[in-house]
Image: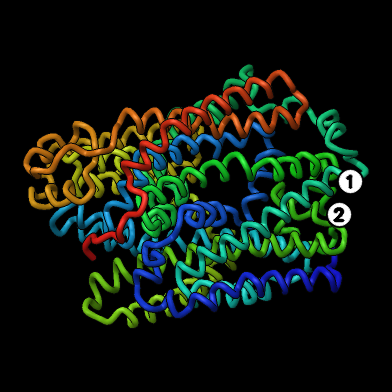
Amino acid sequence: MSLTTLDWFLVIGLTAISFVPALLLARRGGSSSAEFFTSGRAAPWWLVGVSMVATTFSTDTPNLVTNLVREKGVANNWAWWAFLLTGMMTVFFYARLWRRSGVLTDLEFYEIRYSGKAASVVRGFRAVYLGLVFNCFIMASVNLAAVKIANLVLGWPMDQTLIVCAVLNVAFAATSGLWGVLVTDFIQFGIAMTGAFATAFYALDHPSVGGLANLIAKSDPATLALLPDFGDWGLTLTVLIIPLTIQWWSVWYPGAEPGGGSYIAQRMLAARSEGDALKGTLFFNFAHYALRPWPWILVALASMIVYPQLSDIQAAFPGMDPALLGHDIAYPAMLKFLPAGFLGLMVAGLLAAYVSTIATHLNWGTSYLVHDLYRRFLAPGLTERQYVLAGRVVTALLMVAAALLTRVLDSARESFELLLSIGAGTGLLYLLRWFWWRVNAYSEVAAMAASFVVSLGLFIARKNGLQMESHVALMLTVGVTTAAWVVATLVTRPADRATLVGFYRLVRPAGPGWADIRREAGVGPATDSMAQSLLGWVLGCLFVYAALFGTGSYIYGRTAQAVVWTLVFVVSAAGLIRLLPAMWGKAGGAGAPGTGPL
């Protein structure tokens, strides 16, 4: 596989076009830390929403979907489709609260919601743990996907790919901060999706596939199924039941956090109003779950006909590094059949997706390390420009650290999996801390400690031969962690009264969990309606799932199912159209910038 002059022209030209906003917004983005990390809280909903989608679309995303489909069929995507429940809960229950809080980062939340040294310790610890350690592992995994694609498509060795990627990402992320990232995301998402649809078109056009109808006819019905085979209870339990009943609310992971957080919260905080935060997050969930998956799924299904076995991929690319061979590599292997021009477009699209994700992680991690660690604990009182300069330096250092980690990621894979497992069981705490005044900083400490101890114990036990299904381990971790933080909440003192009253006056969460504090605060009842939020959550989930499965039914030629899903889509859309104006009115159409404390 080699790129023609036209392909290279498209790759370089589209990359250069994407960089223009970073240059134009450099002065504005560098004027203050608020501009650099939250775009001055002036981003419109459509920019916020598209940026969220672009950020979660990286080079490893189509590879992941391809891997899921090739291993256990289309239904295996429930491993991430279930997180729509989390996403819609963020839309209707939490987006307005985050924007109302006025914080610069979601970690700043700890010191407006909790009191005492414990709150400061949690904020500082999570700044280092998430901003540096966890973040570098995430970026290294994204880098590794880019390395695989570059090796397959361009023949580049790892070091060459990492150097080029590091220069590009630091240039994008450090120049103009979040403003540049948001606008660049908008452009790059268009490039990436155009490339994804082009790849799907030419995958279906491959002689071995013979078009969409032949693809469906040649594929195993079990592979095409949108739900797992209920006759295989073990598969159904792990692929569908556990994700829908436990995983979605109990597991913390960047981009799918219960209650919002990380770069999703960063974009909600960057919105120009509460209404923009709500609308942007709603659009993100629709595009993330309903718009993006099917081009990737079609390519994955086609790859199973073109490359039935991994050995077929190895034979087609004899120069590929054998260490990189896996089902995930089938997606970039399908790029071989793109004609001149379209191959360049797809490479530019994958590069755009990669840069969008890494630039976001660099800005997000830097915001933690500069605002929640350096500014809060190490060097308070500096000028805004000094903090922006620190942000640019940290951005470059984070990229270097992630690139170095990429080289040893395979040997560090077990450590990375341990880090991922530590988030299990903490999700319920992140949901309830907004709506129950009794939750305190020690609840957070207990949740993190219990999750770490259980995850580490299971990790060591498995290394020593313990056989335990992943869903059993998840339920055990969730049960122990939840019990630990609930007990800690009840036996320790809550945050001091002044902090609780101040938080309620600032955020005004609805529901009975703040009744005592609400009376003491002397503030009228919250304008938010829990009933409306619950209805919006249900309608939003039906709306997106109907779009996702309705599209699949039309693709499969299952007209009756498609009509049913279309009716569900129309009814839920009508319900949202009636409901959302009332919620947007309460959220405010043009909120002022937040005024939360640093």
Q: CA distance from mark 2 to mark 1?
A: 7 Å
Q: What's the amino acid at mark 1?
A: His
- Can residue 264 be seen in this snapshot? yes
Q: Residue at 57% across / 66% down in the picture?
A: 184
Q: Residue at 20% across / 50% down in the picture?
A: 441
Query: Residue 444 location in percent, x, y?
Result: 25, 47
Q: Nearer the viewer, residue 143 or 507?
A: 507
Up/down of 354 relative to 548, above or below:
below
Pointer 1: what residue? 206
Assign a secondary structure to mark 1: loop
Q: Residue at 36% across / 41% down in the picture?
A: 427
Assign a secondary structure to mark 2: helix
Count of numbered marks: 2
**Crowd tier of the residue under label 1, counting other residues whose Cα lies within 10 Å: few below 14, some 14–19, many 20 or above:** some
Query: Residue 457 location in percent, x, y?
Result: 38, 44
- Looking at the image, do the residues carrying marks 2 and 1 touch, with CB atoms under 8 Å apart? yes
Pointer 2: what residue? 337
Query: Residue 211 location in percent, x, y?
Result: 87, 38
